[in-house]
């Protein structure tokens, strides 16, 4: 069932599976890029071979030691290189020259073309891995899929834990699930469902079972900014236990930031103008949420200081 969330990319996934060339999957952290990579591998001529994951976000010494071993383990199969933008330049060169017969699929949570322009990523490696390029949208951009994903994850963790939680949450809980912006995307949703199923064990998930940051975001803010009187604040559930005001304010701020980025197609200059922030402040907020890598944050800072548009 989890594969059905990628129906809008199905044609591109099929085309990627039919070629031996490199595939680049972009998207925010936690959107399900590895799931897409596994689907492509499973439908390719290399499906009987190993599917090996190499995460470049780990420490430099660790990735240095694992690099060749991972390539050899994927011999005849597929290697999925997560966060390839974090791969050191000397290992990027080795990957370009690699002669091990493996299929390369890579993911990145930043704009690799910008990284190439800024000399942070090799252009020849970019060409090698981007024969087919696809983007996995953030979960907030495919809200209609959230009920299906909630059911799928409840079913998954019911089986794994022996629980018997109703696969259909209450209307109030479902409203919260679909209203929360999910900055951690599908991965965050899965972790929330896993915890609820383990803690609840049985019955129907209600709003009171949800983390405060989720059930307090039950209605999207209307488009627009400016004076506070022009903002349509979201409806909040105030439980008898009270609320974490800091978490509520942070969730609302994150939601507005996400809206600004979505409306400007990720252009941080225009998004910061919509939010009444300077660009450096916006970049720092994104970095703290894990939506931008340290290298990219530094590049963004240099760009903001030089006044260049993204």
Image (cartoon, rainbow, N blue to C red):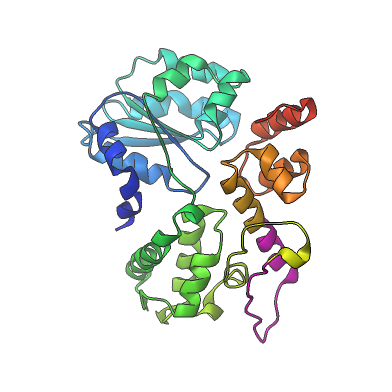
Left/right of residue 221 with respect to residue 48 in the rendered view: right
On-image quarter of the N terminus:
bottom left
Along the viewing direction, whichever of 77 and 23 lies nearer the viewer: 23
Residue 48 found in image quarter: top left
Along the viewing direction, whichever of 217 and 95 lies nearer the viewer: 217
Vertical comparison of 29 with 201: above or below:
above
- The total number of labels drawn is 0
251 is within the stretch colored magenta: yes
On-image quarter of the C terminus:
top right
What residue occupies the far top of the structure in this picture?
97
Residue ID at (43%, 18%): 127
Residue ID at (68%, 29%): 309
Residue ID at (42%, 43%): 33
Left/right of residue 68 with respect to residue 1 in the rendered view: right
Q: Is residue 88 visible?
A: no
Residue 4 found in image quarter: bottom left
Along the viewing direction, whichever of 29 and 177 lies nearer the viewer: 177
Along the viewing direction, whichever of 95 and 64 lies nearer the viewer: 95
Residue ID at (59%, 40%): 266
Vertical comparison of 201 with 6: above or below:
below
What residue occupies the far bottom of the structure in this picture?
240
Q: Position of residue 74 (x, y in %)?
A: 33, 29
Q: Position of residue 172 (x, y in %)?
A: 50, 79
Q: Is residue 185 visible?
A: yes
Q: Position of residue 5 (x, y in %)?
A: 35, 53
Q: Position of residue 209 (x, y in %)?
A: 53, 77
Highlighted range, magenta = 232-253
127 is within the stretch colored magenta: no
């Amino acid at each position: 069932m989890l594969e059905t969330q990628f129906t809008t990319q199905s044609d591109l996934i099929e085309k990627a599976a039919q070629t031996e060339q490199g595939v680049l999957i972009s998207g925010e952290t936690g959107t399900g890029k590895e799931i897409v990579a596994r689907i492509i591998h499973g439908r390719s001529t290399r499906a009987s071979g190993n599917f090996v994951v190499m995460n470049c976000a780990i420490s430099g010494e660790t990735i240095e030691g694992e690099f060749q071993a991972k390539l050899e383990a994927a011999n005849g199969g597929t290697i999925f290189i997560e966060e390839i933008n974090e791969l050191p330049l000397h290992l990027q060169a080795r990957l370009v020259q690699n002669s091990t017969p493996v299929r390369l699929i890579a993911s990145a949570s930043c704009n690799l073309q910008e990284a190439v322009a800024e000399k942070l990523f090799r252009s020849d490696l970019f060409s090698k891995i981007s024969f087919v390029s696809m983007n996995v949208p953030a979960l907030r951009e495919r809200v209609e899929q959230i009920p299906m994903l909630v059911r799928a994850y409840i079913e998954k963790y019911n089986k794994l834990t022996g629980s018997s939680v109703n696969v259909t949450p209450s209307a109030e809980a479902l409203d919260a699930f679909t209203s929360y912006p999910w900055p951690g995307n599908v991965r965050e949703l899965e972790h929330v469902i896993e915890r609820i199923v383990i803690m609840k064990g049985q019955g129907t998930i209600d709003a009171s079972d949800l983390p405060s940051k989720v059930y307090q975001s039950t209605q999207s803010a209307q488009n627009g900014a400016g004076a506070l009187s022009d903002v349509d604040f979201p409806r909040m559930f105030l439980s008898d236990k009270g609320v974490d005001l800091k978490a509520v304010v942070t969730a609302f701020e994150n939601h507005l930031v996400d809206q600004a980025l979505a409306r400007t197609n990720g252009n941080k200059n225009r998004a910061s103008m919509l939010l009444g922030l300077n660009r450096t402040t916006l970049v720092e907020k994104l970095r703290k949420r894990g939506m931008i890598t340290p290298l990219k944050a530094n590049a963004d800072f240099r760009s903001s200081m030089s006044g260049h548009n993204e």
